[in-house]
Image (spheres, grey):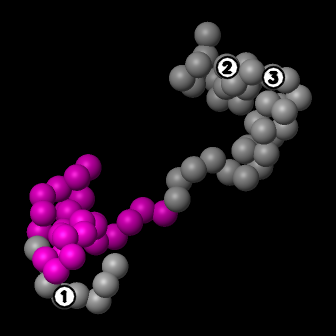
């Protein structure tokens, strides 16, 4: 983002105030959440299982019971 201070409110998205820069038209929110992805340990374990021939559905069953692909 640039250093412009000419911004306007531009609605809300997922409960957070959305802003727009009047000069360049770029949209942004005031404060972003921290990354909430999977841990490096879990990611590496799943990749190892996949490389060794286990399917994504099977990995999901083993690592995340009740997940999207659980039987």
Residue 19 on the magenta span: yes
Place of residue 52 in the rendered image (x, y in percent of width and height, measured from the top left): 88, 29
The answer to whether residue 24 is above or below residue 39 is below
Above or below: residue 71 compared with residue 34:
above
* Location of residue 23 by image quarter: bottom left
x 42%, y 62%: residue: 33
Q: Reading the chain from its start, which is encountered first: label 1 or label 3?
A: 1
- Side of 20 relative to 28 (left or right): left
- Residue at point 65% right, 29% down? 64
| 6 up-or-down from 35: above or below | below
Magenta stretch?
9-34
The residue nearer to you, when weighing 17 against 26, is 26
Residue position for label 1 = 5
SS at circle 1: loop
Q: Which quadrant would the N terminus be assigned to in this image?
A: bottom left
Q: x, y percentage for residue 45?
A: 80, 40
> Residue 54, which numbered label?
3
User: Image check: 32 left or right of 44?
Assistant: left
User: Magenta includes 31?
Assistant: yes
Classify residue 16 as left or right of residue 45. left
Q: CA distance from mark 2 to mark 3?
A: 8 Å
- Residue 61 appears in the rendering: no
Q: Secondary structure at mark 2?
A: helix
What is the secondary structure assignment of the residue under circle 3?
loop
The one nearer the camera, 4 or 71, is 4
How many badges with numbers are in the image? 3
Residue indicated by mark 2: 57
Residue name at image x 19 percent, y 70 percent: 25
N-terminal of the two: label 2 or label 1?
1
Position in image of residue 57 (x %, y %): 67, 19
Q: Of all residues shown, which one is farthest toward the right?
A: 52
């Amino acid at each position: 983002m640039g250093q412009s201070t000419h911004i306007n409110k531009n609605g809300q998205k997922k409960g957070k105030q959305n802003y727009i820069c009047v000069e360049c038209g770029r949209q942004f929110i005031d404060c972003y959440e921290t990354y909430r992805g999977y841990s490096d340990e879990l990611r590496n374990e799943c990749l190892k299982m996949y490389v060794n021939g286990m399917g994504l559905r099977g990995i999901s069953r083993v690592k995340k019971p009740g997940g999207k692909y659980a039987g």
